[in-house]
Amino acid sequence: MVVRHTELKKMEQLYEENGNQLVVLYGRAGCDKETFIKLFCKNKKYFYYRARQASQQEQCMQLAHEIEQTYELSLSKYTYAEFFNRIRSGNATKLVVIIDEFQYIAKRDEEFFEAVLKLKAKKLYPGPVMIVLASSSVAWVEQEMDGRFEDGIKKINAKIKLADLKFIDTVRSYPEYSVSDCVKVYGILGGVSAYMNRWSSKKDIRTNICRHILSTNGYLFAEAERFIGSELRELAIYDTILAAIAAGHRKLNDLFNVTGFSRAKISVYMKNLAAFEVVEKVSSFETGGWENAQKGIYQIRSNYVNFWFRFIYPHLSDLYWMTAEQFYDTYIEKDLDDYMNRYFIQVCMEYLELLNMVDKLPIKIHKAGTWVGKTGNIDIIAQDSARNNLIGLCNWSEPKLTYQMCEKLFDTMKKAKLKSDYFYLFSARDFDQELLDKSKEDKRLILVDMTQL
């Protein structure tokens, strides 16, 4: 099981503080927030309620029933103020009150948050309390919650997001796998802990894909559409757009030509997908060569959604007709390395971020990104506050990273109007002899092979 030590430590620190605390804990479906909450509540006094998608009256009735059952009492009023007045820890211990999927209440009932603020201010239950409002609606928490609660939002002590895990967590989770295999798992699953916890490093990549993704009873079978449909409607439109992006149509005008939807309609639906962290606009690192950069490029942000629409959605009929193994061998195996190029760049970027944290780089990175040009890309651009640059070149699929690739990078840098004194050259396999010789002469060239990641 993946354990989120950083977020857990922050929650524990808040719990140990004097007085009452109000925390918003949130993350996308699949972040395993329920498991995280159980781990945090271990050896603590707590009351947990999972909100329903229900009317105000039904919600109050359900919560009232659970309070009456938990504390063996009868309620005279069905109000949130009354509910929070009757909870208790039984001693001087701080009580943790968790309202999970709280957005289902907050969207419909203004009294709820008023009662939460009274509870925090010790106007209801008088004992020490830590209130945890949990949600799996990232878009609602980040874009709508503040407006709903207005000035009361200032009373929240912390917002803790259970974001997707990093590549280093993938490496730690699969001790039997090589770094190369971990990159593949990361490219397929991303850092979604619920997916990761079902993947076994005792089985090879092919077996896991066949068992969990390509088999109709697999946990991840059709998970991409379940995830999108958990908050977004009109799946026919979203699926059409995502299939087009996965097929390489990455500009608004391309999507217009392929889907038949109007540009205005596509823009609205892309905005919804971006809010839900499914797609993102690719912004090139700001350089002097703006006229040579591509603009308005989109990509699927969610690793698993991208994998599904890239490999499986276009061949859905065969998914039901073939065996899982036949499907993998026919449609996935030959193109998997090409698909992984993008994710290898992310892994290399994370490697540089870790080195930066421990001051092991020649510059202190202030910001980093990529550059998408009309005739070539720059995989990694990292810059310090004085605008000194560090450039990264990442080779995943080719047998060797060659000096010729470096020369192409230098040419692209001219078009981007970039200069650098430091080049980190990452290769998943090997380096050609010319590059090995050049790196001995030119100390700006730093070679990093897969085993160092």
Image (cartoon, rainbow, N blue to C red):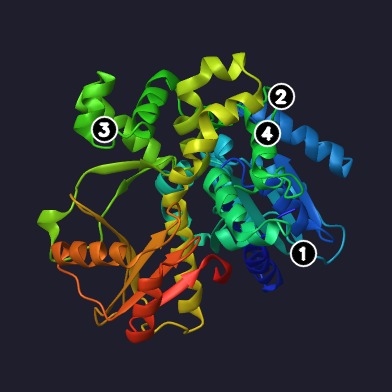
Residue at far left of view: 291
- Residue 141 is situated, as x and y percent measured from the top left of the image, at 48, 46
- Pointer 3: residues within 10 angstroms few (<14), some, or many (20+)? some
Residues 264 and 375: in front is 375
CB within 8 Å, label 3 to label 4: no
Q: In front: mark 2 or mark 3? A: 2
Q: CA distance from mark 4 to mark 1?
A: 42 Å
- Residue 200 is situated, as x and y percent measured from the top left of the image, at 73, 46
Mark 2 or mark 1, earlier in chain: 1
Q: In front: mark 4 or mark 1? A: 4
Mark 2 or mark 4, earlier in chain: 4
Residue at the spot of label 2: 217
Please report the residue visible at 13 percent of the width from the left and 55 percent of the height from the top: 292
Residues 188 and 279: in front is 188
User: In the figure, is residue 280 to the left or right of 24?
Assistant: left
Amino acid type assigned to the residue bearing label 4 in the image? His
Please report the residue visible at 51 percent of the width from the left and 73 percent of the height from the top: 354
Q: CA distance from mark 2 to mark 4?
A: 8 Å
Residues 18 and 162: in front is 162
User: In the figure, is residue 32 to the left or right of 420?
Assistant: right
Amino acid type assigned to the residue bearing label 3 in the image? Ser
Mark 4 or mark 1, earlier in chain: 1
Residue at the spot of label 3: 267
Residue at the spot of label 4: 212
Residue at the spot of label 1: 94
Task: Classify 13 as above or below 274.
Answer: below
Please report the residue visible at 41 percent of the width from the left and 59 percent of the height from the top: 395
- Pointer 2: residues within 10 angstroms few (<14), some, or many (20+)? few
In terms of secondary structure, where does tag 4 sit?
helix
Q: CA distance from mark 1 to mark 3?
A: 48 Å
